[in-house]
Amino acid sequence: MIHTFIHTGAPVSSRSVARLAEHGLSPASIRNVMADLEDSGFLSQPHISAGRVPTTAGYHYYIDTLMPTHQLSEEKRRYIQENLAEVLTDVEELMGVVTHLLSELTHQIGLVLAPTIGETRIKGIHFMKLSGRRAICVLESEGGLLEHRIVQTTQLMSPEDLLRISNYLTEHLSGLSLKKIRDQLLSLMADDRAQLNDLLESAVSLAQQALGTEEEPELLFEGTETVLTQPELSDIVRVRKLLETFTDRAELVRMLDQLIKGGGTRVIIGEDSDLTSDLDFSLVATTYGSTDRVLGALGIFGPSRMEYEKVVPLVDFLGRKVSETLIGGEQRKS
């Protein structure tokens, strides 16, 4: 019955189930079973004369106990790996390709919470002179992430001074996360004042400017135009709600971040959360990173009647591949 609803989007009647199934039950018997399932909260009936549709509880029961276990086909695995192989050295491009693959292979909205450099270990801190007292700080993570930040020096500094500061900070802070680096700055000033003399104060000041602020995760998404063609979005009110959801990116990032805490792959359906309830959508999402350090998340967002048996293994596979790419990059460079 769930398969039928997923593919048609129309409430499923007992008669249609009797025609499709090979269980030998009459439409009347199936109708009784469906009524019992409705009483138990697994099905609902939109209208008295209509068939029934799965509820949030019904979808979860199907996914947890009845859904066939599928592996991605070898063809899809190879296609994904070939696309990822082209961007292994560029994290920004990698995130874009992953977003596209999620949408392309499911015809739903692909979502990626890109990693912030604050969640990774720093390999290098490099300052380069711009005009006047301005300088650019390039943060390089061990996994290959690069981030640029503009800072203001307290006095005119030569390129040589900035190079000395870069070397000093890299020597003392490489291998730490930004969160730990922030804790180290004050102790560096106390312990090593004699080593850099006049440059130490400038080094700490520049480091605090470049490293002292938390960066918000970047949200990438693709596929809204595809979802708009599905029957669920024939209602202009729901279209407006969908567009509003993606207009307030900061709130969407906050909600996604809350939903994925704890790691692993999660299926959030309809009334499970404020993000999915108004639209009657589902989010199939997983985190990527390592067991002790979550770097970001990726997933599929679309109408609740999505093909979970295909979407769940796809999301899981891409999560593992992104984890291998980023964490493997750190291990290769360490």
Image (cartoon, rainbow, N blue to C red):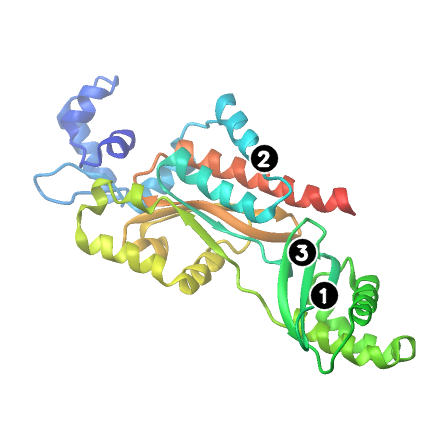
Please state which amino acid type lies under the numbered disc 1.
Met
Q: Is residue 193 above or below residue 175?
A: below
Q: Position of residue 45 (x, y in %)?
A: 16, 43
Q: In whole angstroms, how far apart are the C-alphas of marks 2 and 3?
A: 22 Å
Q: For the point 80% across and 66% down, which residue is it?
A: 163
Q: Position of residue 298 (x, y in %)?
A: 49, 47
Please state which amino acid type lies under the numbered disc 2.
Glu
Q: Residues within 10 Å of mark 1 (few under 14, many from 20)?
A: some
Taking depth in this image into account, of 292 and 92 the one nearest to the observer is 92
- In the picture, the disc for residue 120 is 3
- Which of the two labelled residues, at mark 1 and mark 3, occupies the earlier sequence position? 3
Apparent side of residue 301 relative to residue 229 in the rendered image (left or right): right
- Which of the two labelled residues, at mark 2 and mark 3, occupies the earlier sequence position? 2
Quarter location, residue 230: top left
Q: For the point 78% across and 68% down, which residue is it?
A: 159
In terms of secondary structure, where does tag 2 sit? loop
Give the number of the mark in front: 2 or 3: 2
- In the picture, the disc for residue 86 is 2
Please state which amino acid type lies under the numbered disc 3.
Thr
Q: Is residue 138 above or below residue 323?
A: below
Taking depth in this image into account, of 135 and 3 the one nearest to the observer is 135
- In the picture, the disc for residue 128 is 1
Q: Residue furthest left?
A: 49
Q: For the point 15% across and 36% down, which residue is it?
A: 51
